[in-house]
Image (tube, grey):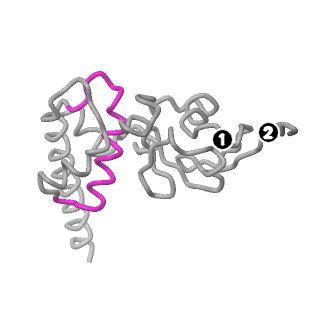
Amino acid sequence: MAEVAVGKVAVTFTVNGVERTVETYPMARLLDVLREDLRLTGTKEGCGEGECGACSAFVDGRLVNTCLVPAIQARGAKIETIEGLASGAELHAVQQAFIDAGGAQCGICTPGMVLATVALLREHPEPTEAEVREGLAGNLCRCTGYMKIFDSVETAARAIRARQDAATAGEGGAS
């Protein structure tokens, strides 16, 4: 049986709003492409098996474990990493909440926890405790008992609601 050599291919996708093309092996992990080729090191490798959530990123709006996604599967996708969450120098409300409430510990799980929280709050703007636990269930932290992380989610939900209320009040005053 003859061996088939598989070479690198060009893969183009949009990362944090910028179209990027990388030359990579089709089955290279998206995690490695983000970290090594694009130097987006906020995406962390924890377990490498899709169990810990440290490598989470949004791919076409869906939260995925990038250690499980072949680079070729991301062709044409819109990818958002932790680096793309902030707006310039202004942190996203969830990032700020993790700082304010002490949810960020050693930093390995934090990017995945933050992105999981963003996904959770998009679906459940006022999550119950059960929804928070379920929303973060795919993310593991070895540093905490999760209470400060749960506090961070609650802080973020309040901050996002306050920003939305302020924006709504501003729109009402403009008429």
Along the line of sight, the residue nearer the viewer: 62 or 173: 62
- Of helix, strand and loop, which one carries label 1? loop
Along the line of sight, the residue nearer the viewer: 168 or 34: 34
Q: In the image, is residue 2 above or below residue 168?
A: above
Q: In the image, is residue 25 above or below residue 76?
A: above
Q: Position of residue 153 (x, y in %)?
A: 20, 45
Q: Position of residue 150 (x, y in %)?
A: 16, 41
Q: Earlier in the sequence, mark 2 or mark 1?
A: 2
Q: Residue furthest bottom?
A: 175
Residue shown at 23% from the left, 67% from the top: 168
The answer to which quarter of the image holds residue 171 is bottom left
User: Is residue 78 toward the left or the right of residue 158 in the image?
Assistant: right
The amino acid at mark 2 is Val
The amino acid at mark 1 is Met
Q: Specify whether residue 15 is painted magenta.
A: no
User: Is residue 106 toward the left or the right of residue 38 in the image?
Assistant: left
Q: Give the residue at mark 2.
A: 6
Residue shown at 56% from the left, 46% from the top: 15
Q: Position of residue 122 (x, y in %)?
A: 30, 59
> Which quadrant holds the N terminus?
top right
Residue shown at 26% from the left, 30% from the top: 141
Residue stretch rendered in magenta on the structure: 103-126
Q: Give the residue at mark 1.
A: 27
- Of helix, strand and loop, which one carries label 2? loop
> Which quadrant holds the C terminus?
bottom left
Along the line of sight, the residue nearer the viewer: 30 or 152: 30
The answer to which quarter of the image holds residue 54 is top left
User: Is residue 174 toward the left or the right of residue 155 in the image?
Assistant: right
Marks 2 and 1: CB-CB under 8 Å? yes
Residue shown at 19% from the left, 37% from the top: 149
